[in-house]
């Protein structure tokens, strides 16, 4: 059985800013702070891998200030490639280059062991490919993403469309509750199942198990290739975990 989440819409009136909204403003400032801090990892003539999502967008904007120093970039999504080109930054196909010096990307969850959940933006497979190609992986995130154990954020799994029912049943057998991400298709032409309630006590093992399921393209656990550096933005500034 494949579960889906209904899409609800409502007409609302503008309201004064709440405490939660102010918290979001702080979170946005933290994302910008870690994006700027990541520029310290950019050296002259590098080829820079660039991730996808709101924090990666902040990094792209920061990268534009030093674009004259780098050789070029590789993007993990069409959206990121478009934003990079909008800043006048060269974007290359991964197959056309012989190296990626550093990969900068955000995360939906991260642990102090530098294991991650990624894929909230749906680019997990290309993100994993670029991360796997990079000599160094620098993850940037605000402190709301730092957790003791992965799994509160639903795990994205990219699936070949004809296999979504088969994969959903296999994920149910692993103890998860898969939901089809309605109205979304990846840059690779596939669908995403967001899997809730998984017990991720051993991230490398679960990553391997899910990737071996027939019909799965990739899942959003980054443990076989974790981050090398984690930059966490908080109210008191940016701290570095290695």
Image: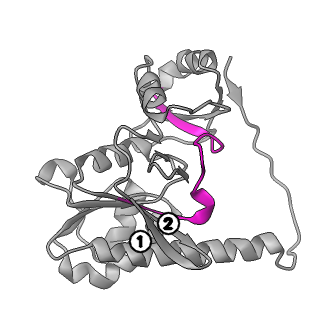
Q: Which residues are magenta?
A: 138-160
Quadrant location of the C terminus?
bottom left
The residue drawn where x is 57% and y is 56% is: 146
Q: Which quadrant of the view contains residue 237?
A: bottom right
The residue drawn where x is 34% and y is 55% is: 228
Q: Relative to residue 183, is residue 48 drawn left or right?
A: left
The residue drawn where x is 76% and y is 38% is: 6
Q: Dot 2, crowdedness within 10 Å: few (<14), some or many (≥20)?
A: many
Residue 129, compared with residue 137, is above or below; it is above
Q: Nearer the viewer, residue 135 or 78?
A: 135
Cα distance between the residues tagged 2 and 1 = 6 Å
Residue at the spot of label 1: 59
Residue at the spot of label 2: 55
Image coordinates for residue 119, horizontal then vertical, percent: 50, 46
Label 2–label 1 contact, CB within 8 A: yes
Magenta stretch: residue 16 in it?
A: no
Residue 32, compared with residue 178, is above or below; it is below
């Amino acid at each position: 059985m494949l579960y889906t989440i209904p899409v609800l819409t409502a007409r609302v009136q503008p309201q004064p800013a709440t405490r939660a909204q102010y918290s979001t403003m702080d979170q946005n400032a933290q994302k910008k702070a870690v994006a700027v801090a990541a520029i310290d990892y950019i050296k002259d003539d590098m080829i820079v891998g660039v991730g996808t999502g709101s924090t990666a967008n902040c990094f792209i904007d920061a990268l534009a200030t030093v674009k004259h120093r780098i050789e070029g970039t590789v993007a993990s999504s069409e959206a990121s490639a478009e934003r990079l080109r909008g800043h006048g930054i060269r974007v290359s196909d991964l197959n056309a280059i012989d190296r990626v010096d550093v990969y900068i990307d955000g995360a939906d969850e991260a642990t102090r062991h530098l294991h991650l959940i990624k894929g909230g933006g749906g680019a997990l497979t290309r993100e994993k490919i670029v991360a796997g190609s990079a000599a160094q992986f620098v993850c940037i995130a605000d402190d709301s993403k730092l957790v003791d154990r992965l799994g509160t954020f639903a795990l994205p799994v990219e699936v070949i469309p004809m296999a979504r029912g088969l994969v959903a049943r296999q994920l149910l057998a692993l103890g998860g509750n898969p939901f089809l991400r309605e109205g979304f298709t990846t840059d690779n032409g596939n669908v995403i199942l967001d899997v809730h309630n998984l017990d991720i006590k051993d991230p490398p093992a679960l990553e391997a198990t899910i990737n071996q399921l027939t019909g799965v393209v990739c899942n959003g656990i980054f443990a076989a290739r974790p981050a090398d550096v984690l930059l966490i933005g908080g109210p008191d500034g940016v701290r570095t975990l290695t």
